[in-house]
Amino acid sequence: MKFKMIHENYNVTDLEKSLAFYKEAFGLTEVRRKTAPDLSFIIVYVANEESSFELELTWLKEKVGRYDLGECEFHLAFQTDDYEAAHKKHQEMGCICYENPSMGIYFVEDPDGYWLEVVPTR
């Protein structure tokens, strides 16, 4: 029996803001969208050409305020072929929330507080 990871879900409070962030920060664009007939939710899958893995962004109409992410001890990781350029871009965006130079990694925070790890190709 085999299992293939296909997507991860993040619930978001402002779908358009999140779509803009992921496009600018990681080049992720909309692959497909599901909208509830009563407009109670919208699910947008985003991805890029680097892999078949997708990030599912879910907006819920009834949700008010930020999501409780606990201690934020989970994250999605992105590998980049140009670590210095990625770091510069994210620094300019003002979204770097933690750096670990000794490990050669850093984290950015999306508009809803999710942490995203950036690692170089090794």
Image (cartoon, helix red, strand yellow):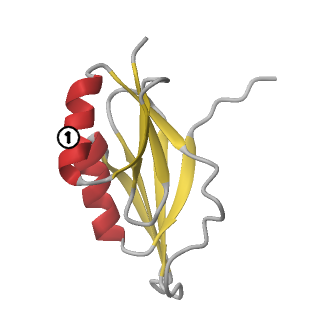
- Residue drawn at (56%, 73%), measured in percent from left and top? 67
On screen, residue 78 versus residue 7, left or right, reads: left
- Residue drawn at (26%, 44%), measured in percent from left and top? 90
Give the farthest residue toward the right. 1
Q: Does residue 98 lie above or below 33 as drawn?
A: above
- Taking depth in this image into account, of 98 and 90 the one nearest to the observer is 98
Q: Does residue 72 lie above or below 81 as drawn?
A: below
Kind of residue at badge 1: Lys
Quarter in which the N terminus is drawn = top right
For the image, the number of numbered tags is: 1
On screen, residue 89 versus residue 63, left or right, reads: left
- Residue drawn at (42%, 28%), measured in percent from left and top? 101
Q: Residue 30 placed where, x, y %?
A: 32, 52
Q: Residue 72 placed where, x, y %?
A: 60, 56
Q: Badge 1, how many Cα within 10 Å: few under 14, some, many 20+? A: some
- Taking depth in this image into account, of 98 and 51 the one nearest to the observer is 98
Quarter in which the C terminus is drawn = top left
* Quadrant in which residue 18 is drawn: bottom left
Q: Does residue 55 lie above or below 51 as drawn?
A: below
Q: Secondary structure at mark 1?
A: helix
On screen, residue 67 versus residue 79, left or right, reads: right
Q: Residue 86 placed where, x, y %?
A: 25, 33
* Residue at image mark 1: 89
Q: Residue 100 placed where, x, y %?
A: 46, 33
